Image (tube, coloured by chain):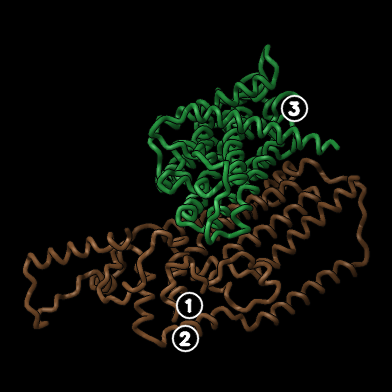
Chain colours: A green, B brown
Amino acid sequence: MGVIVTGTAVLAALLAGAALTYGLERLFVQHGREPGPAHDVEFNRNLHIANSDRWLLPAGPVVAVAGVALAVVVVPFGPGLIGRDLGIGLFYVIVVIDFVVLGLALAGWGADTPDTVEACYRIIAQLVAYVVPLGLAYVGVIMMARSLSTISVVNAQSALWFVVLQPIGFVLYLVTGLMQSYRAPFLEPFAGSIGGGVLGVSGGWSALLWRVALSGVFFLVAAIGAVLYLGGPSGPVLPGWLWMLVKTYALMALMLGLGRCVRPLSTAQMLALSWKFLIPLGLVNVLLVGGLILLGIGP
Amino acid sequence: MTAMLEIVTFAVCAFIAIAGALGMTTTMSMFRSGIFLMASFIGVAGLFILLAADLIGILQIMMYIGGFLVMILFMVLVMHDPGGAMMAGMDMALIERWFSKGLVPRGHPHDGHMHGDHKEGHDSDNQENDAAEHASGGGHEGHSMPHGAHAAPDHPSMQHGDDTGHEGHAMHHGNGNHSSTEMGEMDMSMVTPVRPVAAWLAVAVGIVLVGMLLLRPAWRVVDALPDPDSARRIGQLLMEKYMVAFEGAGFLILIGIFGAVLLARPSTYPDDSSRSAKVAVDEKPEPIAHDGLPPLTRSERSDEHQARQQRPKEHCA
C-alpha cells in the first residue's frame, strides 16, 4: 500500500516538475535560436513512419520515462518528502538516468530514418563523455558528505553550502548537467539540421512521453544540483519544499541563461571539451576536495 | 505480502534474464541482439538487488547500458547487416521468427513506385541498396530516380553521394550471374552449421549447473541480515583486503587507455617502402595520351560539365 502511494506521489512530482520546467524553458527560447529538446512536437496525431521497427520505436519513450520516474524517487523535496532514502542514492540517480539515453537510442534506431539514426549515434557518443566528468562532479560532494544518501548530503550542508567549498565542482556540474539534459550548447542530438532528432518522428502519445522524459531529465538535473551544491530543501523561514522549488528553478534558469551565452557545440567539439578539459578539471577538483578534507575544512 | 512481492519480483527478473538471453541468440537483427543481451544483464542486476546487493546491481546496470550502447555503435560500424533486413527474409524457426518480429525483410520494395518497373533481379539490387542504407542509416526517401536511368553508361550518379547503391545496380547489369553467387555467399555466411550442437551443449551445461545447485548437500541457513550499507563494506574491502588486485586492475585499464591513445594518434608511416606505396595509391592516374580521339576544346568541356551539373536536379525534381 505504501508503495502505491509513494509511486503516485513521485509521478505527480515528476509531472509537475516537468511542466514547470517546460514553462521556464519556453521563456528562454529566443527567436532564431534552436530550441533543442523544447522543440515543437505533434501531439494531435500519430505519425506513421515507414520501415520503422514496431517494437523498438515505441519502447524508447517508455524506457526513458521509466528511467526519469525511477530517479525522482530519491530526490528530497522537503523534510520527509522523499520517495525512498536509498543508501546509494546519488549513484542510483546517475545510473537510472542512463535509461533516458537507452530510450533515445532505441527510438532513434527503431525509427530507421537517416535523421534519427544520426541522433542515435550522437546520443551514444555523448553518453560516456558526459558521465565521467558528471561522476567526478558528484564525487567531490560525496567525499565531503561521507555518504551516497541524498538526505545525508543535505544534512551535511546545514552549516555551509558545498557551492562555497567546491566552486570548481559546481561549475563542472553546471556544464555536465547541460550535457546530460541536452540543453543549449549541447543540443546536437536534437538539432534542427536533423529535424529535431527523435522528436521529429514522434507524435501523439510518444510525443507526450518524450516531452515528460526530456523536461523531467532537466528537472532532475537541476533538483540534484540543488541537493548537491545548494543545500537542497534546507533554509530559514520558508517551508522546505518551497526552498527546494526556488533553488531548483533558480539553478535551472542559471543553466539555461549560461547555455544561451555560448554558441552551440557540435558533437565532436563537445567530446573534445569533455575528454580534454572537463575530466582533468574534475580530477583536480577531487584532489582539491581531498586536500580540504585533510585540512579539516568542511563538515 | 513481502514474500509474495519477492517471488513476483524474482519471477519477473528471471524471466527478463532468460528471455533476453534467448532473444539475443535467436533474433536476426544485431542491434536487437545487443539490446536483448543488455536486458538479460539488467534482469540479473534485478536479482542482485533482490539479494540485497544493491550496489553491485546498480553497478552492473551502469556498466551494461553504457558499455553495450557503445558496443552496439561499433558493431553497426563494422557489420554488414546490423538491422537484420537481409536475414529477416530467410527461413526461420518459430522462436527466431518471434524474436525477429517487425523487421522489414530484404526483398520487399520500400516504395511501390520506386522499384515497380524493375522486377527481375530485384532481390540482389535491393540487398546492395539496403546494405548502403543501413550503413548510412535508414530509408532512402529523397531518392526517387527512375530506374531506367541506371542503364545509361554515364549517368551522374556520383553527384548523388550514394554511389554504393548504384554500384550495385551497375554490377548487376554487367554480370547476370552475379545475383546467384551473391546469394550463395550470403547464405553460407549466415548459416551456422554447429548451432544445434551449441544449443544441446548449452542445455547440458544448464542441467549440470542446476543439478549442482540441487544436489549440494546442505545450504547453511544464517539468521543475520545482510549489511544494508553494502557500499561502505565494499569500499572498505576494496581499499584494504583486495587493494592490490583493485589497483592492479586499475593499472591494467590505464595501460589499455594509453594503448588506445597511441593507436589513435596520427602518425607517420614507419618506413620508406610503405610511404611510397601510400603515395602511389594517392597519385592521380596518368592521362591516356594516345586514345586516337580529338582533344576536347574548352567550350565542349564546359558544356559537358554544365550538363552533368544540371541532370541530377532534373531527376530529383
Return the residue nearer the eye: A48 or A9.
A48
For the residues marked 2 and 3, what is the alpha-carbon distance in whole angstroms? 68 Å
Pointers 1 and 2 in contact (C-beta within 8 Å): no
Is label 2 in contact with label 3 (beta carbons under 8 Å)?
A: no
Label 3: state its secondary structure: loop
- Which residue type does callout 2 highlight? Ser
Q: Reply above or below: B316 against B289.
A: above
Quadrant housing residue B17: bottom right
Q: Is residue A209 left or right of residue B137?
A: right
Q: Which residue is mark 2?
A: B180
**CA gap, disc 1 to disc 2?**
10 Å
| A1 lies above or below B90 | above
Residue identified by numbered label 1: B123
Q: Is residue A278 above or below residue A227?
A: below
* Residue lying furthest top: A237
Where's the N terminus of chain B, which quadrant?
Answer: top right
Give the residue at x 16% y 75%.
B286
Q: Is residue A139 visible?
A: no
Residue nearest the observer in this picture, B297 or B253: B297
Question: Which chain letter goes with mark 1?
Answer: B
Whether residue A19 is situated above or below residue A125 in the rendered picture:
above
Judge left or right: residue B73 versus residue B44: left
Quarter holding the C terminus of chain B is: bottom left
At 60% from the left edge and 27% from the top edge, which residue is drawn? A226
**Which label number is shown at residue B62?**
none
Give the class, few, some or many, for how many residues have Cα within 10 Å of label 2's Cα (few <14, many ≥20).
few
Residue at 82% x, 55% y is: B10
SS class, disc 2:
helix
Left or right: B167 in relation to B281? right
Q: Residue at x 58, y 56 (%)?
A: B67
Question: In x, y percent, where is residue B6?
Answer: 85, 50
Relative horizontal placement of residue A248, taking residue A89 as reference (left or right) = left
